[in-house]
Image: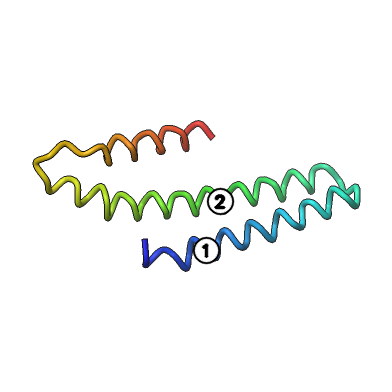
């Protein structure tokens, strides 16, 4: 995950800033559609960060587990997370 660390961290910081802005919008009684739009933008960037983390996991941990003769739960673990992500 080392290569993706900066990108994922940046995305999470952006989302945090967006969420802080959304809280201010709510306090300021801003238009609901504007708030909903910003919420969707935050969700989108967090989804992208999640995808990067999962891709890194598959490239490293899962890929390494494929090269062993011992059954490894890494593949099932990754599949469970992907299923949860699909439910969002």
Q: Tag 1, which secondary structure?
A: helix
Name the residue at 12% across, 39% down.
Answer: 70
* Quadrant of the image occupied by residue 79: top left
In what quadrant of the picture does the C terminus appear?
Answer: top right
Q: Circle 1: is it few (<14), some (14-19), or many (20+) Cα within 10 Å?
A: few
Question: Image height check: is 4 above or below 75?
Answer: below
Look at mark 1 in the image and give the residue it sits on: 9
Of badges 1 and 2, the one in the foreground is: 1
Nearest to N terminus: mark 1 or mark 2: 1
Q: Circle 2: is it few (<14), some (14-19), or many (20+) Cα within 10 Å?
A: some
Which numbered tag is attached to residue 46?
A: 2
Name the residue at 29% across, 34% down.
Answer: 76
Q: Horizontal placement of 10 versus 16: left or right?
A: left
Q: Position of residue 85 (x, y in %)?
A: 47, 38
Q: Horizontal placement of 40 versus 6: left or right?
A: right
Q: Position of residue 74 (x, y in %)?
A: 27, 41
Which numbered tag is attached to residue 31?
A: none
Q: Position of residue 48 (x, y in %)?
A: 50, 52
Counting labels gives 2
**Viewer-nearest residue: 44 or 1:** 1
Q: Tag 2, which secondary structure?
A: helix
**Viewer-nearest residue: 73 or 34:** 73
């Amino acid at each position: 995950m080392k290569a993706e660390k900066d990108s994922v961290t940046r995305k999470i910081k952006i989302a945090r800033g967006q969420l802080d802005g959304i809280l201010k919008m709510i306090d300021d009684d801003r238009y609901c559609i504007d708030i909903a739009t910003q919420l969707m933008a935050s969700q989108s960037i967090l989804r992208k960060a999640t995808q990067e983390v999962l891709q890194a996991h598959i490239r490293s941990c899962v890929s390494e587990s494929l090269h062993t003769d011992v059954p490894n739960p890494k593949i099932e673990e990754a599949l469970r997370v992907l299923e949860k992500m699909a439910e969002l």
